[in-house]
Amino acid sequence: MAFRGMMARLGSGGAGVETVLDRPETTPGGSVTGTVHVTGGSVPQDVTAVRVALQATVEVESGDSSWREEVTFGTVAVAGAARVEPGARHALPFSLPVPWQCPVTAIDGWQLRGMRVGLRTRLDIAGSVDPGDLDPVTVLPLPVQRTVLQALDSLGFAFRGADVEKGRVRGSELPFYQEVEFTPPYGLRGRVNELEVTFLADPQGVDVVLEVDRRGGLLSEGRDVGGRLRLSHTDTDVRSVAAHLDAAVRQLGARRGWF
């Protein structure tokens, strides 16, 4: 029995956890719902908590080096302390709020390369290896975010890629931010290498943060950004949003002598 207890603490023969999502898709400001299924192992175990959290793959830069790491955010407790008996089965429903500034991982049915958000389930057992469970979650853009992307396309900006970087911009609430990258239209090439867009959404709307090129470190923590446009969640007219974006880019360009 002592050997079995030791093996359970090491993750062999211990309680298992599996999460079933109601839907694998959500949006910023939405929620992820589902059920955590806990199954008892070969020996009784005292669980201190069952938790779920979102997890994002984030790019970290330091000097000339860069690497990726997994960052959890938005953690909630599904259940508190309890004893899980051998062979017991427990179904624990949950609802996890999705932060408004959660990265978008797919647009119009296309998965953004390198964008990974998942739901991490943790079974906390004193002195044991957490078996854990990770389920992919697709985060779709809000209507106003989708409108911004369509408006940029109408202005001739071509989608290039996206990444999630560790750090903060002014107004951000998470320890990382997403950049959506665009190639500029023909008329700006040679003067503008790239337009990067960051969405900082909240219950009232979204700040569209504009950065041109990476030179100058405009999105470095503690410094202001190149340009910023505030939109409400009802701003879903592509032509109107395109006009606002065009004006914002031109204003930024005028300050830098592009025009």
Image (tube, grey):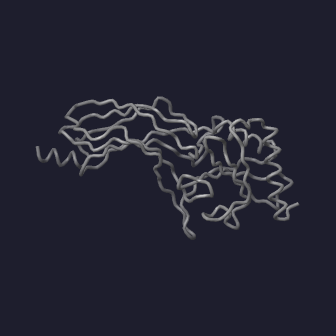
Is 7 situated left or right of 123 in this image? left
Q: Quadrant of the C terminus?
A: bottom right
Question: Residue 51 lies in what quarter of the image?
Answer: top left
Question: Residue 219 lies in what quarter of the image?
Answer: bottom right
| Residue at the left extreme of this rendering | 1
The residue at the point 25 percent across, 38 percent down is 82
> Which of these two is toward me, 207 or 128?
207
| Residue at the right extreme of this rendering | 259
Is 165 situated left or right of 48 in this image? right
The residue at the point 29 percent across, 38 percent down is 16
Q: Give how far across and how far down residue 62 sits, in percent.
A: 54, 67
Q: Give how far across and how far down residue 2 sits, in percent.
A: 11, 47
> Which of these two is toward me, 128 or 28?
28
| Residue at the front extreme of this rendering | 204
The residue at the point 85 percent across, 62 percent down is 258
Tag count: 0
Q: Give how far across and how far down residue 255 sits, in percent.
A: 82, 63
The answer to whether residue 178 is above or below residue 111 is below
Question: Residue 19 lies in what quarter of the image?
Answer: top left
Q: Quadrant of the N terminus?
A: top left
| Residue at the bottom extreme of this rendering | 63
The answer to whether residue 200 is above or below residue 192 is above
Q: Give how far across and how far down residue 13 sits, in percent.
A: 22, 41
